[in-house]
Each structure stands twice: as structure tokens, then as C-alpha cells.
Image (spheres, rainbow, N blue to C red):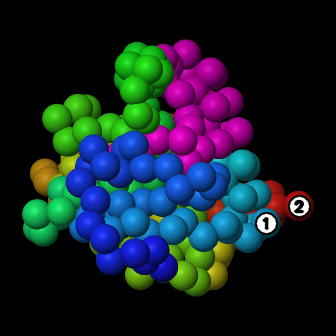
Amino acid sequence: MTLTTQRFTLEEYLHYDDGTDSLYELVNGELVSMALGTGQHGELIDFLNTQFRTEITRMGRDWVSKQMAIGVQSPRGDRWDTVRIPDLMIIPKEQWRNLQNREAVIRLNEAPPLLVVEVVSTSTKSVDYRAKRAEYCVLNIPEYWIVDPLQAKITVFTLSEGWYDEVVFIESDRLISSTFAELNLTVNQIFISEI
């Protein structure tokens, strides 16, 4: 849902405060309110965040997994700025440290996240599958997951030669991830994790 037709630059967006705790993405210069997700949406994000953090520790990687805490500036054909806030993001700890004393937005001239995850809801389905897929590909994000509880499937996009290769996982399929090569999770485990 677009909040206003007033256009914001990236800098105006980064300093915008409407006096609420509302979260907004910036899409072509317009503020788009991020609707509060369902309990299922939150549960899926929590479960994956816990799994990612456990796997990061097990692998001994200097990475962090963050829930809706970091924006990523996105290139679009329009002259107006866009900032997406993924449900989950994996980045190196050093990159996270660099965001500590400024707005937590990864700029176009900075290294992209290692992995981003979006959990689909009825209102975000088209954006998650189409717009964000294209934007994240252009940003060279190596891996993008779409967790879709509406269709009980998880789609993993892996960057290859500038394009995303797509693999769809359902039911008892074990997820295959280039970021987490030894992750031992099935689609059923993720969707049954809730409550």
C-alpha cells in the first residue's frame, strides 16, 4: 500500500520519521507501508533466522543473520530511489559493523548481501516473485529465497552468469543452498515449525 504520492529522495527517506514505529520501503520515491505480517509469517522468519544463526556458528563464518533490520538500495529504471527491506538477510559481520553508526541501508556502491529471504503473503506475492527477484538479480545478490506458505513451497534463486537459476522445493525436499551447503532442512520442517 502506497502511503503518499509525495516523492522522496534516498536521503529524505533515510531521515523520514512520521512519529510512529511503522516500517516503510521506498519504491520509486514513494513510501510504501510494510503491513504487519501474520503470526505464521513471523514464525517462519524466526525459525529460519534461528536455523541460519546456528548454521553460521557451526560453519565458523563471520556472518550475521538479521530480521527486517537492514535495507538494500535497489536500482530501478525510474529516476527515483528504491529501498527494499528483506524479511531476512545474511551479511558479513564487518559489513554489519559498518552500518552501526549510520542508516542501516546497503548502498548500490557496497557489497550486496550474501543471501536474502522474503516470506510471501497475499499482499506481497507479486512483488516478491517479480519485482524483488529482478532487483536482487541486478544487485548481484548471490542467493534469494522465496518462502511461500500460500503454496507450501520454497524457491531458491542462485545467481549464475548474471541471471538467477531457479529451483523449487516442496514437501520432503531437502533445501539446497550455495550459501549454506550443509544445511539439513526440508520444506516440511520449515512449514511445520510454526507454533
Q: Which mark is residue 10?
A: none
Please tell me whether mark 1 or mark 2 is closer to you in this view. 1
Rendered image quadrant of residue 49: top right
Give the side of residue 72 with respect to residue 175, left or right. left
Quadrant for residue 50, please give it: top right
Q: Earlier in the sequence, mark 1 or mark 2?
A: 1
Residue 119 vs 182, above or below: the answer is below
**Residue 124 screen position, x and y as percent:** 50, 76
Count of labels shown? 2
Q: What range is drawn magenta here?
A: 49-73
Q: Position of residue 41 (x, y in %)?
A: 69, 65
Give the residue displayed 26% in from the left and 67% down from the top: 7
User: What residue sits right under mark 1 in the picture?
Assistant: 39
Residue 139, how many percent across, how many down? 22, 49
Q: Nearer the viewer, residue 153 or 65?
A: 65
Q: What is the number of the mark on residue 195?
A: 2
Q: Nearer the viewer, residue 191 or 23?
A: 23
- Residue at the spot x=51%, y=68% of the render? 33
Are discs 1 and 2 less than 8 Å apart at CB? yes
Helix, strand or loop at label 1? It is helix
- The structure residue drawn at horizontal position 54% and vertical position 41%, both measured from the top left corner, is 69
Per the image, is 161 magenta?
no
Q: Can residue 179 be spotted in the picture?
A: no
Magenta stretch containing residue 54, yes or no? Answer: yes
Q: Left or right? Give the position of 178 relative to 150.
A: left
Q: What amino acid does circle 2 point to?
A: Ile
Q: Nearer the viewer, residue 22 or 48?
A: 22
Q: Secondary structure at mark 2?
A: loop
Above or below, comparing residue 141 to residue 171 in the picture:
above
Look at 73% across and 70% down and name the residue there. 38
Q: CA distance from mark 1 to mark 2?
A: 9 Å
